[in-house]
Structures are given as structure tokens and as C-alpha cells.
Amino acid sequence: MISMITFWEENMTDNGDIKNKEQDTENQDQENSGNIKEYGIPENTGYKKNIQFISLIGEIEGHYISSNDKKSTKYEHIIPILINSHQDPNIEGIFIILNTMGGDVEAGLALAELIHGIRKPKVSLVLGGGHSIGVPLATSTDFSVIVPSATMTVHPIRTTGLVISGPQTFRYFQKMQQRINNFIVRTSNISEKALIDLMYASDQMANDTGTILVGAEAVNVGLIDTVGDFSFALTKLNELYAIIQMYCNKRGI
């Protein structure tokens, strides 16, 4: 009798309906699966973490939809996550994981500017690759890390398809390139001359101008802060947060 009463109290709703715990669990699993599929991030409401992990993988998709045979990151999905991370007081730091082939220049630069403008500790980790527009995305954080086996391709912007040939088109590409160069220079330790030399090197890539940097090479030229792994990058993020907390405590903020 007692066991039946206990079961009744634990499994009945106020309306007298039996709670379907299995259904709730299934719904939560479906929600997590949907979030992973769309955003690359599970939403576990039972446990709130103090660090927001954001994965930028495949091709950065911008104004045009990528083909179905490509992995892509939709920038309209990442922007709300970044804004929420900035406004949520429970989020103490942002961890950007990069394995991208590049993609839409304006979308990637927009994400980089948004990441850079968030006033919370931020660390990026280049895994696999941080190519093309992935370079400013990697340098947009307070501290950047690259694993020894990861690569970064630095090259000038280019496009495929129909192009209107004329001086105006050339000047447009020049201005776009300068926007990218300016951002990389102000968010990393590389000089503009060194960056341009890497972009227009003709002896590094078989079918294009540019330079492929592997692991420590990206650190040596000043693009990335250091070589490390996931645990190192996570520890660095916690250190940055501790430094900010110490400063705020001293100032009474």
C-alpha cells in the first residue's frame, strides 16, 4: 500500500494524469538532436554550463545557401548564440572551435567582428583547419590556440562564376581585401607587410597564390598566440576569467 502511494505521488500530475517520464526524456533527446543538427550545440536544460562552446565547421554560409554535399555553418544561426552569450550573466567565457575551409567573406567577417566585440573572455582553438576567412575568425578572440597538426591557408579573396570585368570590380575586391587585412592586423601580432607577403606568395600553393601554415608556423608569423590542445585552451579561458574577476573585485565592480 505504501509503495503504491509513493508511486502515485511521484508519477501523477495535478490533473490526475500519469506522468510520462519516458516521453519527457524522449522529447528532450529529440530537442537536443535537433539543436545539434541545426546549430552544432546541444541544449541541456538540466545543467547550465558557464562556458559557451561554439563550433565553426565546414563552409561559412552567408547570403547564399551552400550546396547539399558540403558541411556548412550558417552565420544567421551563430549570431543569436553570440548575442545570447554576451547578455546571459551565467556565461562567463566563450570558446570558439574552428575547423573551417572558409566561405562567405562578409558573413565570416561579420562573425569575427561580433566575436571581437563581446566583452567576455574569449579563446579560439584551430582544429584541423582555419582557412581563408577562418583566419580572422581565429584572431577575433582574446587568445588563440592552434593544435600542432592544424593548418591555416592565407590567401587573397577570390570568387567564381560570372564577374563584371572593369575597374570598379577591381577596386571592390581591393577594399574588401583591405577590410580583412585591417581586422587581422589589429587582432593579431602579424604586421601588414608580413600578411601581404604570405597572401601573395607564389611558391607555396600549386594552383593559387597564398601560404599554408602548419601549427607552429602560424605562431611564428604572429597570426596565432600559441600551440596547444583543447585542455590548454580551456585552462587559458578560465585564467582569463579569473584575471577579470580579480580586476573587478579590486575596483569594486
Image (spheres, rainbow, N blue to C red):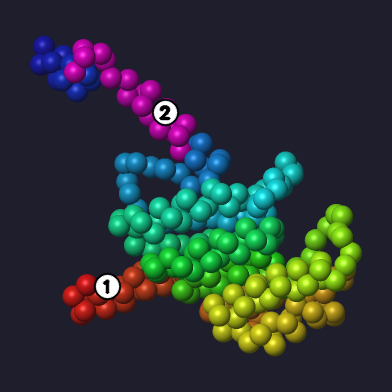
On screen, residue 65 versus residue 56, left or right, reads right
**Image quarter for residue 45?**
top left
Say if 142 sits above or below 192 in the image.
above
* Quadrant in which the N terminus appears: top left
Depth check: 182 or 16 in front?
A: 182
Mark 2: give few (<14), some (14-19) or many (20+) Cα within 10 Å: few
Mark 2 residue type = Asn
- Per the image, the residue denoted by label 2 is 27
Q: Where residue 129 sits: x, y (%)? A: 65, 64
On screen, residue 198 versus residue 52, left or right, reads right
In this view, the residue farthest toward the left is 2
Q: How many marks?
A: 2
Can residue 149 be seen in the rendering of this structure?
Answer: no
Depth check: 32 or 210 in front?
A: 210
Depth check: 216 or 166 in front?
A: 166
Main SS of the magenta segment?
helix
Depth check: 11 or 169 in front?
A: 169
Residue 178 included in the magenta stretch of the image:
no
* Quadrant in which the C terminus appears: bottom left
- Residue sitting at x 34%, y 70%: 241
On screen, residue 21 versus residue 154, left or right, reads left
| Dot placed on the residue nearer the N-terminal end, 2 or 1 | 2
Where disc 2 sits, the SS reads: helix
- Residue sitting at x 52%, y 42%: 36
- Range of magenta residues: 14-32
Q: Where residue 24 sits: x, y (%)? A: 36, 27
- Per the image, the residue denoted by label 1 is 245
Mark 1 residue type = Gln
Q: Where residue 41 sits: x, y (%)? A: 48, 47
Where disc 1 sits, the SS reads: helix
Camera-side mark, 2 or 1 = 1
Q: Where residue 163 sits: x, y (%)? A: 86, 59
